[in-house]
Image: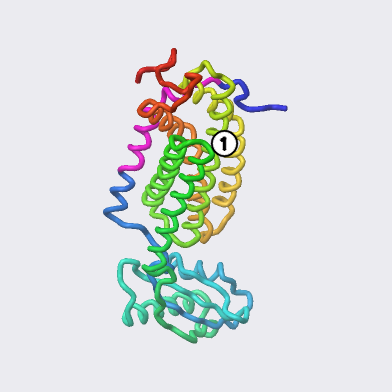
Amino acid sequence: MLRLFNQANFEFLARRRVAYGLTLAFVIPGLLLLGIRGLNTSIEFTGGTLVQIHVSDSAIRTADIRQALATTGIEAAEIQTFGAPDEFVIRARLDPRVEVSEETTQETGVAVRDALTGAFGEDVIRVDRVEAVGPKVGSELRERTLMALLLAFGAIFLVIWFRYEWRFSLAAVLATLHDIVATVAFAAYLNLEVSLVVVAALLTIIGYSLNDTIVTFDRVRENLKKYKRDNIYEILNRSINETLPRTVLTSGTTVMATTALLILGGPVIRPFAWVMTFGIVTGTFSSIFIASPILWSVERRWPGEDVRGARTIAAKGAPAT
């Protein structure tokens, strides 16, 4: 059976400074762009206009309505059937920077009606209702979501501390934070619309990246017992190389699936696919080039107590810098 990187022997930790430099070069401009332009949030976060329509042509589908709106500049509208197959509810906005008001509601309603009647004809489209809608995700929910994430990271830190020790916990949490920040910067570069689906993708990335890091750390723990005379630098490099086939296979197959979503999926699912694809790549990168180097740096600063001498940075062969 073919196994990629079966005899890998790369010096991953020796490339840690290059990895740190690439991360900073990618993240810092993205965060600056985010600060200048802000996130492109969806109607779920900002609110917008609800337009309920009736269509007399049964051949018209959600994709047709979305395309008709997009051709007139109304992007990222939420469209769904409402009861009967010929009834649709459209949530749209003309300018995400303008707050929802009675004036903007009427403007959006007129724009949606003109776009649809221009595409399908006045006899086909009937507008039944136009009203302003508030954001599904209010400030209170956003605060609770942030609090939930902080509590989750705290729980992760404690669980890994209990399973391994606090040095492993700190490295895993910092590597996961790296993935979140890098993914947010990526969304800023592409100006992706941040919806609840994208938030779900971000949460999935956290779990994926954390699991990938734990697999490597579990091998580190095994090798600490197996190679008692080696220092932590050698053990970390060996552990990354030994888990590399699993990492490449898992990440590669998952990226294939998300790439298929990018190519074959529609505009609604595409932001999710972009975030997932990038998140898998950066999660794999961080588990190799971020988590383990951080663990080694922490061990250098606060060496773990080990009567065997296998964990001390002063062990023979450990690099000084």
Is residue 74 among the parts visible in the rendering?
no
Please state which of residues 279 and 288 is positioned toward the viewer in this rendering.
288
- Taking 158 as reference, is 111 above or below it? below
- Residue 78 in the image, given as x and y percentages of width and height: 49, 69
What secondary structure prevails in the magenta region? helix
The residue under label 1 is 215
Residue under the image location 41 percent in, 77 percent down = 133
Please state which of residues 202 and 235 is positioned toward the viewer in this rendering.
235
Outermost left residue: 36
Outermost right residue: 1
Outermost top residue: 316
Indicate whether residue 22 is drawn in magenta. Answer: yes
Please state which of residues 298 and 47 is positioned toward the viewer in this rendering.
298
Q: Secondary structure at mark 1?
A: helix
> What colour scheme does the image use?
rainbow
- Taking 153 as reference, is 96 above or below it? below
- The image quadrant of residue 170 is top left
- Name the kind of residue labelled 1 in the image: Val
Is residue 238 among the parts visible in the rendering?
yes
Indicate whether residue 206 is drawn in magenta. Answer: no
- Residue 303 in the image, given as x and y percentages of width and height: 40, 26
Residue under the image location 49 percent in, 53 percent down = 203
Residue under the image location 31 percent in, 81 percent down = 103
Other residues around mark 1 within 10 Å, as few (<14) / some (14–19) / many (≥20): some
Q: Is residue 61 left or right of residue 14?
A: right
Query: From which residue to which does the magenta span run?
Result: 9-28
- The quadrant of the rendering that contains the C terminus is top left
